[in-house]
Image (cartoon, rainbow, N blue to C red):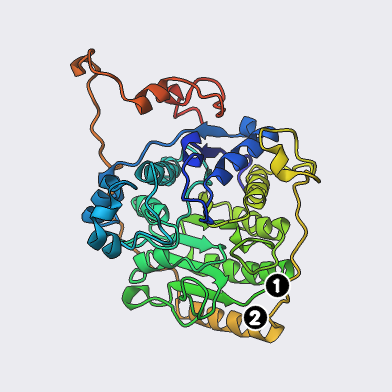
Amino acid sequence: MRSKDRISYFYDGDVGNVYFGPNHPMKPHRLCMTHHLVLSYDLHKKMEIYRPHKAYPVELAQFHSADYVEFLQRINPDTQHLFPEEMAKFKLGEDCPVFDDMFEFCQIYAGGTIDAARRLNNQLCDIAINWAGGLHHAKKCEASGFCYINDLVLGILELLKYHARVLYIDIDVHHGDGVEEAFYFTDRVMTVSFHKYGNLFFPGSGDVKEIGEREGKFYAINIPLKDGIDDTSFTRLFRTIISKVVETYQPGVIVLQCGADSLAGDRLGCFNLSIDGHAECVRFVKKFGLPLLVTGGGGYTKENVARCWTVETGVLLDTELPNEIPDNEYIKYFAPECSLRIPTGHIENFNSKSYLGTIKMQVLENLRCIQHAPSVQMQEVPPDFYIPDFDEDEKNPDERIDQHTQDKQIQRDDEYYEGDNDNDHNMDDA
């Protein structure tokens, strides 16, 4: 075990200001609530807080097709009716609406995960957190399940520059299909997804029989679960499978997607997990002592999402949080009891011991087919993605500085950066 983990936490207040629409379950406002809860517990004093860079289109096109990225950049609510063919082709509309500042929202959450991966690669931290990330359904050429850009795939591609093997773990109630699909044919990324599986449950994939193909055969692991799984069953299964995965695969780094829609009482979920049960998975993964990138994901009962990710920030900092929520800007959302813990759900648990036993046996059997960790021929490390620097002297002083550049020079009221503002942060002081 490391003596003290160095933790980098990425947040940009603008990410919580976007609005998917009146009846849409995705509420990015939950990210502001999470951040303020983290601040109210003084957790910011124990980690380095960074505002992520906005990912450049050329960075997003490391995974996504250039025409898709270009369309996301160009489209807005007023012009979408002019492009019915592209809207259909790129699957924009109902689940993935076009809204104001949509592309900037994608740039911020993707930039956070890319920055997190780079700090881990450069050994500037041991754990990197981006609660705004974890949008695991987006595909190469299309939006899916409220996800437009797949920040996880972009972060993993970054980690692969320095690590022979990356382990991806997903505890969102929905199958991590976009990440699995991106790495389905390679043994350099092992994807492990615990999720609700059923014909009518989105996205409809994630059967235990989906195991990867070609070089990737046996490197995709799916744990399909039924309604109502509780803390005891979930954490026992999680610990058994993840221990064996880490022992067999020997990853150099872990990416953990902590979708909070697997909590009891979620608007779209159907599990009985308490926050402590969910957080136990984070605690268990941290114990391996490997570089760790942690993201958010789903979660549609926003006060519980904020509670969950705050508790998990505490877990990553080895800090036990008192149950009474300190006063903060969003305290009314946690009233009347203002407590951090939530009761577990009362959905009947349809996961029998024999069902879970069968799933566990199948997964462990598949793992036995990987005799040992694959020996990857590492090539020379490509550089971090090149972004041109602008020469200050060549800038025209008469041109207006764009708003984002101005924002970077000032400290916002609703964000907290220890010491200097994030622009001048000494990147080597970790």
- Other-residue count near label 2 (Cα within 10 Å), few / some / many at <14 / 14–19 / ≥20: some
Write down the quadrant of residue 40 in the picture. Answer: top right
Residue drawn at 72 percent across, 66 percent down: 231
Residue 338 is situated, as x and y percent measured from the top left of the image, at: 78, 43
Q: Is residue 38 visible?
A: yes
Q: Residue at x 59, y 81 (%)?
A: 359
Q: Which mark identifies residue 191? A: none
Q: Quadrant of residue 413?
A: top right
Q: Is residue 375 visible?
A: no
Q: Amino acid at mark 2?
A: Leu
Q: Residue at x 57, y 25 (%)?
A: 418
Q: Who's the residue at 74% across and 65% down the image?
A: 345
Identify which amino acid the numbered label 1 is placed on: Ser
> Which of pointers 2 and 1 lies earlier in the amino acid sequence?
1
Q: From the top left corner, tell me how far across and down residue 387 is, in percent.
A: 26, 36
Res. 356 mark: 2
Label 1 Cα crowd, 10 Å radius (few <14 / some 14-19 / many 20+):
some
Q: Position of residue 125 (x, y in %)?
A: 50, 39
Viewer-side residue, 395 vs 321: 395
Q: Give left or right: position of 10 versus 401.
A: right
- Disc 2 is placed on an element classified as helix
Mark 1 secondary-structure assignment: helix
- Where 88 falls versus 22 (above or below)? below
The residue that mark 1 highlights is 233
Asked if the residue at tag 1 contacts the one at tag 2, i.e. Cβ–Cβ closer than 8 Å, the answer is: yes
Residue 287 percent coordinates (x, y): 63, 54
Q: Is residue 164 above or below residue 35?
A: below
